[in-house]
Amino acid sequence: MFEFHPSKVSSVKNDVLSGLTVALALVPEAVAFAFVADVEPLVGLYAAFLVGLITACIGGRPGMISGAAGALAVVMVSLVADHGVEYLFAAVVLMGILQITAGALRLGKFIRMVPHPVMLGFVNGLAIVIFMAQLQQFGTPGEAGWAAGTFLEGSVLDVAWLEGAAMYLLCGLVLLTMIIIHFLPRLTKAIPSSLAAIVVVSLLVVGFGLDTRVVGDVASIKGGLPAFHIPMVPLNWETLTIIFPYSVILASIGLIESLLTLRLVDEITETRGRGNKECVGQGVANLVTGFFGGMGGCAMIGQSMINVNSGGRGRLSGISAALFLLAFILVASPLIEQIPLAALIGVMFMVVIGTFEWSSFRVIRKVPKSDALVLVLVSAVTVATDLAIAVVVGVIVSALVFAWEHAKHVQVIAREDHKGSTVYSIHGPLFFGSVTSFLEQFDPALAKDDVIVDFADSRVCDHSGLEAIDSLAERYLSAGKTLHLVHLSPECKKLLRKAGSLVEVNVIEDPHYFVADDALG
């Protein structure tokens, strides 16, 4: 019952209407993220417009929505507090340059290294973060941090909860929004159910004069067109040392979140985006945004899910969302400011339900314990810290688990050939994780005087493997044995310091592969 059933067919009507739905939900988020970064609301709104428009035009994933993001805002706040907003604009420009460079160097392909359990943990963790962020709206207006934490994760325990009629009304409107979104597609798919829910709840609040919070209670969104503005910072080495660390962190977080969101949209739409093109698109968007007074941004998983679930598939959906947002800023701010926050909370709750991988509860007992650990760990770290740290932790833990498991797979099978020589056949990769197990399986005292170590079914992966072979050769030579190493690659022979002369070359049978070792320059 929690499944969305988005259309897989792109159409102009679906793209425009889903773009309108996304734009309505973008307003309070962009304002909230601006508060978090300690900048004016229009700085967040301009970022949402410019980043959303440019990535929709030239990015690598049609249908994905980008804009001012909370993961970036929490990094920006210390820069703004210490040096001012002009340094933020300069950092966003440099962030864009770094992202363009990453795309030009085709670094987007490394997102393939993110294992599926990490992806599941990312999705679940982000769904929990979005859910927790909405709970801030159930607090009393005017409390410290209420506006800033509107759509961000925060300490829910610190919220002074609404009471009585105000709480019942807010919960009722949220529930009504969710009911409309869930059941309307069974009646008609002429318009996105999220848009219909926002319109119905807004008319209900205005028509009956219900006393509930609206977008205008967060901040005014009225403004003009973004103007070209060169960041007013000194062009010297000191400025670069200030903004460069922030730019690197912002660029990394932005690309990780964007590429993971791209993969998620790929899975839902059963199409394939272009990661390197998206890196360049994000970079160009942030470069331009920095020169037009915006706070920068990246892909937004919540808004992308709203767009996809509302039928948005093509570039027009992202373009229309950005243009509708600009129209809200220029001419429609009085109307948009009357939208109840309850309607937007209900939309985001449905995004949470649709984003969370409920199947993970079913499969967590069936998958290996290591995968289950990674899934839970990434979810927890995403909630506790941020997305970039969670993904890096997940990839590192997955790599260590992989190394540990493969360390068990190296086997040494001993036999005696027709010439009376002891032959050791090596099976499995030889690398830093498996060298200890590899060496433990040899005993020079039990071997004949002539010993052959056959690497036909093995592969030396790194410097640790080479050192293990050198150590093995030294042990057998010290024991007075004659040692032959066969079926090693030419590169192994070149890199082995002590055992290189023991490698017997067979041009026809010897494998050809490369070893990860700095000695090759």
Image (spheres, rainbow, N blue to C red):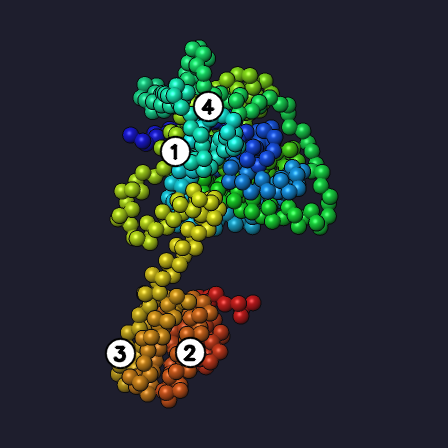
Res 312 → quadrant: top left
The 10 Å Cα crowd at callout 2, few under 14, some 14 to 19, many 20 or more, is some
In contact (CB < 8 Å): disc 1 and disc 3: no
Mark 2 and mark 1: Cα distance apart in space:
55 Å
Q: Position of residue 43 (x, y in %)?
A: 60, 31
Which residue type carries mark 1? Val
Res 212 → quadrant: top left
Secondary structure found at label 2: helix
The residue singled out by tag 2 in the image is 471
Locate the C terminus and report the quarter of the image it occupies: bottom right
Looking at the image, residue 16 lies above or below residue 155 = above
The residue singled out by tag 1 in the image is 352
Residue drawn where x is 62% and y is 23% of the image: 223
Does residue 16 appear to the left or right of 451 in the view shown?
right
Q: Position of residue 240 (x, y in %)?
A: 67, 48
Mark 4 and mark 2: Cα distance apart in space:
69 Å
Mark 4 and mark 1: Cα distance apart in space:
16 Å
Nearer-the-camera pick, 38 or 89:
38
In contact (CB < 8 Å): disc 2 and disc 1: no
The residue singled out by tag 4 in the image is 341
Work out whether mark 4 precedes mark 2 in sequence or the reverse, and give the earlier one. Answer: 4
